[in-house]
Image: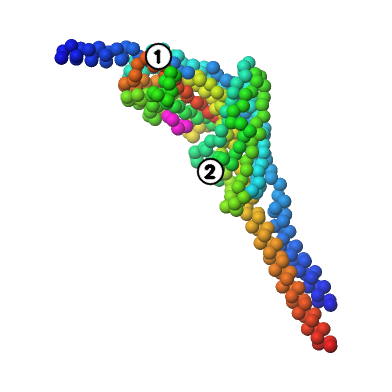
């Protein structure tokens, strides 16, 4: 029994002695521009495109990843709401290789669904660009993307046209009525 | 006859009055503004901290403790900065074994703590690195960082109270920036 206790103690000690080596996983110096993008008057059902430029300032080529990120409310610009759906933002690829001391452009597409419920929106989301690295410390740069949609443009357009047509029919009806009444009187 | 012509003209005018503003709304151009074609960039002068073999429930600090790494704001816009950590994974089989990162810098069985401290940040001292983004430089109580600004900081790691020995672990701390 004493032998077993000693053995257990030895195993416990070994567990502490045979510790794992904790290697905490090279800085990639890069920049992204623009830092902030505003898309205004984007009607539901339409899409807008812009380009992000990633500048790899290193002597080696590097892979960069791009992804949308929902910032916490307190970090958003005043009056901006959470972007409804990150799937409305697309890139040709979420990963891009940039040659040494070079720039690469990434086309970002923002497509708003046709539903009228997305009219009049003022939203913000961030696009995070990071260099692939296994180092302990890594850098990620966010681009602020602020999107505003047209305030119910389609509905107002239809209402205006309908009101105009109704007014025209009413006035034509009145005109016709008075014309025929006048004609009848003359006869 | 005059009445009919007048009616038609009035009707057309009214229809135009109602519909033109709405049609004009439809023709609003979509505008895309790239704010000042700003360039955002931050850099770190150190990204590796090889610890070698570590013992359970032991604190490790970078050397020097709070001036180990320098963050420099490059680019041409003011930035707000954040920091986020993640679980440490076994390099041999990442899905099989990990140390969970605590949210408060404390440790536990297979749970480790990470903290950072910025030189000159006298109010916060050591700040836990969590798995959700937190402020790096406390712009809330101070200001954002401007191009050319530098901040020196150090790290403190607290190993788990228990872990499986002989495994090489790896983790990553991401420091991020957004235009202020």
The verdict on a common chain for dots 2 and 1 is: yes
The part of the image, by quadrant, that contains residue B107 is: top left
User: In what quadrant of the picture does the N terminus of chain A appear?
Assistant: top left
User: In what quadrant of the picture does the C terminus of chain A appear?
Assistant: bottom right
Per the picture, the main secondary structure of the magenta-coloured stretch is loop
The one of B64 and B13 positioned closer to us in this rendering: B13
Disc 1 is attached to a residue of which chain? A
Q: Residue at x 60, y 21 (%)?
A: A62
Q: Which residue is mark 1?
A: A21
The one of A119 and A72 positioned closer to us in this rendering: A119
Q: Residue at x 72, y 51 (%)?
A: B27
Which coloring applies here?
A: rainbow
State which tag comes first along the sequence, 2 or 1.
Answer: 1
Q: Position of residue B30 (x, y in %)?
A: 69, 45
- Vertical position of residue A81 compared to residue B123: above or below: below
Q: Which residues are magenta?
A: B130-134
Q: Which residue is mark 2?
A: A82
């Amino acid at each position: 029994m004493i032998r077993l206790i000693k053995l257990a103690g030895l195993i416990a000690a070994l567990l502490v002695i045979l510790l794992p080596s904790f290697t905490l996983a090279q800085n990639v110096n890069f920049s992204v521009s623009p830092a902030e993008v505003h898309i205004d008057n984007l009607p539901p059902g339409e899409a807008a495109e812009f380009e992000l430029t990633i500048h790899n300032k290193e002597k080696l080529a590097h892979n960069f990843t791009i992804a949308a990120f929902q910032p916490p409310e307190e970090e958003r610009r005043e009056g901006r709401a959470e972007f409804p759906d990150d799937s409305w933002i697309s890139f040709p690829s979420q990963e891009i290789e940039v040659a040494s001391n070079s720039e690469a452009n990434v086309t970002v597409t923002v497509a708003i669904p046709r539903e009228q419920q997305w009219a009049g929106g003022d939203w913000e989301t961030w696009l995070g660009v990071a260099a692939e690295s296994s180092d302990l410390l890594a850098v990620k740069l966010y681009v602020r993307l602020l999107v505003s949609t047209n305030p119910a443009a389609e509905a107002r357009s239809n209402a205006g046209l309908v009101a105009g047509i109704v007014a025209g029919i009413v006035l034509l009806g009145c005109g016709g009525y008075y014309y025929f009444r006048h004609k009848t009187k003359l006869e | 006859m005059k009445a009919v012509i007048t009616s038609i003209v009035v009707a057309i005018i009214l229809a135009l009055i109602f519909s033109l503003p709405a049609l004009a709304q439809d023709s609003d151009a979509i505008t895309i503004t790239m704010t000042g074609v700003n360039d955002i960039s931050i850099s770190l002068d150190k990204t590796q901290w090889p610890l070698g073999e570590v013992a359970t429930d032991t604190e490790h600090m970078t050397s020097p403790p709070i001036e180990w790494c320098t963050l420099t704001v490059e680019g041409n816009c003011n930035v707000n900065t954040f920091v986020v950590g993640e679980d440490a994974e076994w390099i041999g089989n990442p899905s099989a074994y990990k140390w969970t990162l605590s949210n408060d810098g404390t440790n536990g069985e297979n749970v480790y703590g990470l903290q950072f401290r910025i030189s000159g940040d006298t109010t916060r001292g050591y700040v836990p690195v969590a798995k959700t983004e937190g402020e790096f430089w406390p712009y809330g109580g101070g200001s954002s960082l401007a191009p050319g600004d530098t901040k020196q900081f150090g790290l403190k790691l607290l190993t788990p109270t228990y872990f499986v020995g002989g495994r090489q672990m790896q983790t990553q701390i991401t420091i991020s920036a957004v235009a202020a």
